[in-house]
Amino acid sequence: MNTAPPRLGDTRLVAVDGPTGAGKSTFAEKLAEQLGAQLIKTDHFATWEDPTTLWWPKLARALDAIENGQEAGYRITDWSAGFPREDEGPEVTISPQRTIILEGFSSARKAIAPKLSLAIFVEHGDEASRLERAVARDGERHRHHFIRWQQYERGWFVVDKTRARADYVVSSS
């Protein structure tokens, strides 16, 4: 990790990507703790209705500020509730630092690749087992959302070639 050059100003941005239920959050939390890094989750932005698109410019603006040596902030979206109001979620401040971990589905997308010091793809078992892990974590009431989400992920990963571009592929099993 220490040999990966900073590409977001003086900050090393490390993406931890992969499908739902693969163990990305657990892996990223442990990595952030070991590195003393700030953790930003794509779950802070995405919703069931908008897995990857409309929210990305908000995160990109925050990362641009970090690249320019400035603090940035955003409000956390409640992904499980759909489209929230901009001013409702808790506020998070991001500061330029040695390493920032960006965790979640689409965090290693092609659009951010030039600014990533490392891209890590986390996988676990098959889609059915990942679905059960996600439902166990977030509740049965979200099962139908996770089924749709997994369909979206399949297409996204094929087009984005996320796994193939990763510096490391990690199995959480």
Image: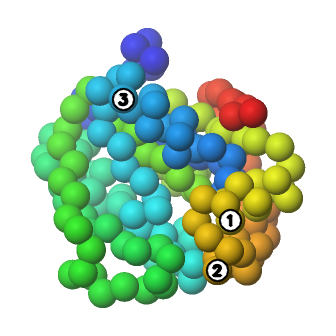
The residue tagged 2 is 141
**Residue beneath disc 1:** 135
On screen, residue 2 above or below 80: above
- Above or below residue 53? Residue 96 is above
Q: Earlier in the sequence, mark 2 or mark 1?
A: 1
| Residue nearest the observer in this picture, 65 or 15 | 15
Q: Residues within 10 Å of mark 1 (few under 14, many from 20)?
A: some
Q: Amino acid at mark 3?
A: Glu
Q: Quadrant of residue 48?
A: bottom right
Q: Is residue 21 left or right of residue 110?
A: right
Q: Tag 1: residue type?
A: Val
Residue pictured at 76% horizontal, 54% vertical: 130
> Split into 4 quadrants, where in the image is the C terminus?
top right
In the foreground, 171 or 58: 171
**SS at mark 3 in the image:** helix
Residue sitting at x 52%, y 46%: 25
The x and y percentages for residue 20 are 66, 57
As drawn, which residue projects farthest toward the left?
70
Q: Residue at x 37, y 85 (%)?
A: 84
Residue annotated with mark 3? 33
x, y percent for residue 9: 26, 35
Q: Residues within 10 Å of mark 2 (few under 14, many from 20)?
A: few
Q: Residues within 10 Å of mark 3 (few under 14, many from 20)?
A: few
Q: CA distance from mark 3 to mark 1?
A: 26 Å
Mark 3 or 1: the one toward you: 1
**3 vs 2, front mark:** 2
Marked residue nearer the N-terminal end (3 or 1): 3
Gap in angstroms between the C-alphas marked 3 and 2? 31 Å
- Residue 104 seen in render: yes
Q: Residue at x 24, y 81 (%)?
A: 88
